[in-house]
Structure formats: C-alpha cells, structure tokens
Image: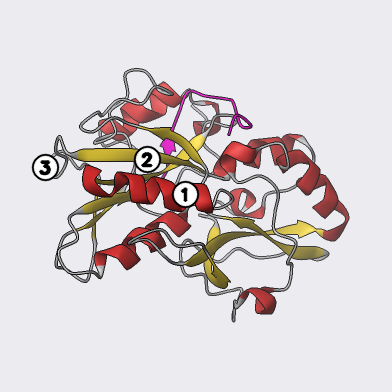
Amino acid sequence: MEKKCLEPKELRQMIRNGQWSNPTSGICGGYVQANVVILDKRYAKEFEEFCNLNPAPCPIIEIFKAGCKESKLAPGSDIVTDVPKYRIFESGKEDFKEETSIEKYFNEDMVTFLIGCSFSFEDRLIQGGVPVRNIEQKKNVSMFRTKKECKSSGHFSCNMVVTYRPIPHTLVEKAKQITIECKAVHGPPLDEQDPNALGIKDINCPDFGEPVKAETGDVPVFWPCGVTCIEAVTSARKLQGFPLVITHSPGHMFVTDSKEFGYK
C-alpha cells in the first residue's frame, strides 16, 4: 500500500502498533498535519498567548482540555501513542530524549496543543504543478533557525524556525498563491529568499531535518515552521523549576482527519 494513499486513521494505527516511526512528509496527502506541544496546565495560557502573538510559525488548530488524549480533529486518536516520534524534555535536564510513546510521562495536568504544519499543503503544491524536492528525494524537510525574533509571552521566547523548499523560480508565485489560503498550516512563504538575510549560514546544513538538494533553476523559498514552538518551550525549560514538556520530533507529525487548511 502506498503510504501517501493511507487514510490518517490507518497511519495512526500503524504508529500505535510500532509499524511507523518515520517523518510524515508526503504521507496521507491532503490531510492536516500538526506539530505537537504538551505541557503543564499552569503554563498553557502563556503558551497560547505566545502562539497567538506569532500566528505564522505557530498557528493553533486545537487545544485539548487538561488530561485529554483524543483530538476532536481525529476521533479515536490517542496523543500519547499516535505521533511517530516524541521529544521528552525532563525538568532539570539539559538534553532531551526521543521515544515512540509517552504513556509513562503523560498526566492529568497536561494540556496538548496542535500547531499547523506545512506538510499539510505539500500535496496541494504537487497537484498544482509545483515540485516538492524533499518528497522527491524521500527526505525530511530542511528546517533552520533564523535571526527573526518572535514576540515573547511570559516564559516563552525564541527566534523563528523556517522550512526550506527549493522551488523553480518560475513557480514561486504559484506556490505563494496555492498556500496563501492555508492559514491554519502557516500560509504563504516569507518574502525573504536570501538565506543570509535570515541568518542561515549554510543551506546544506539544516538545524533540523535533512539536507535537500536544489535542482537547476530552483531558488530558496522559506515558510514559517512550527518547530518554532519547540524552540520556545526549550527556552522556557532553561528557567529553574519548569516542569516536563513533550513535543513531536521535528518532521514526525500528528496526522488529523481534517482537510480544512484555512479555518485559522
């Protein structure tokens, strides 16, 4: 079975059964994919405000009630088992660890945020005749930290992270028009196409994901990225006493049953 043609429910079951732990770019084409942030309810309002102040990289598509594990956008889902790979940031520890289930970490005081992901519109780009090189090359998308500052909220502050997709220069405007209505999953690309202007020193050395090769005639195009949220919670964790935080591993998304890209 082609993974692109899987229904989200089938993919989530595969993930839950330990049969899929890879990135989700190019999977379940046409469905909304989401970044995941799970944190203590004491900090949920602050984090929500951070996202609302920075809607391009951090478009909220759902906030769960404390202790809830099921997404309204994916009936029957379980947020503690249905993400291919998680990052666990434990209180008082500098490093994170990655696991494929968070059942032993999740508790009733935790609030889950789903943040829109640009993987959602990759199928629309392809259907519109815009090549998506990372899918062609069977790679995770390239993600870079930038020098663009996000607006801060309480404990949460960071610079924006972007995804990089090399696109034929003749199709950049088309890519913009395709994605401009997809506000729930980051919307159109940034105006900046110069990596140096964003503070990106080497386009072949991403901070997250994998290097993606440009073809002749391609130019760099950058979209705001939900990994910005991971940077924000990582910054908050440096403060003494900040509790356990769980996120997805970059590129390993929660896939919903929704096809509504513009409701944010």
Magenta stretch, residue numbers: 253-264
Identify the element where label 1 is drawn: helix
Residue closer to the observer: 217 or 34: 34
Asked if disc 2 and disc 1 are in contact, CB closer than 8 Å, the reply is: yes
What percent of the width, then of the height, locates residue 100?
Answer: 25, 45
- Asked whether residue 30 is in view, the answer is yes
Reading the image, the residue beneath label 2 is 113
Residue type, mark 2 in image: Phe
Q: Is residue 195 left or right of residue 264?
A: right
Q: Nearer the viewer, mark 1 or mark 3?
A: 1
Drawn side of residue 183 relative to residue 37, left or right: right
Neighbor class of circle 3 (other Cα within 10 Å; few <14, some 14-19, many 20+) is: few
Name the kind of residue labelled 1 in the image. Answer: Cys
Q: Which residue is mark 3?
A: 104
Query: What's the mark number on residue 51?
Result: 1
> Residue furthest toward the top?
75
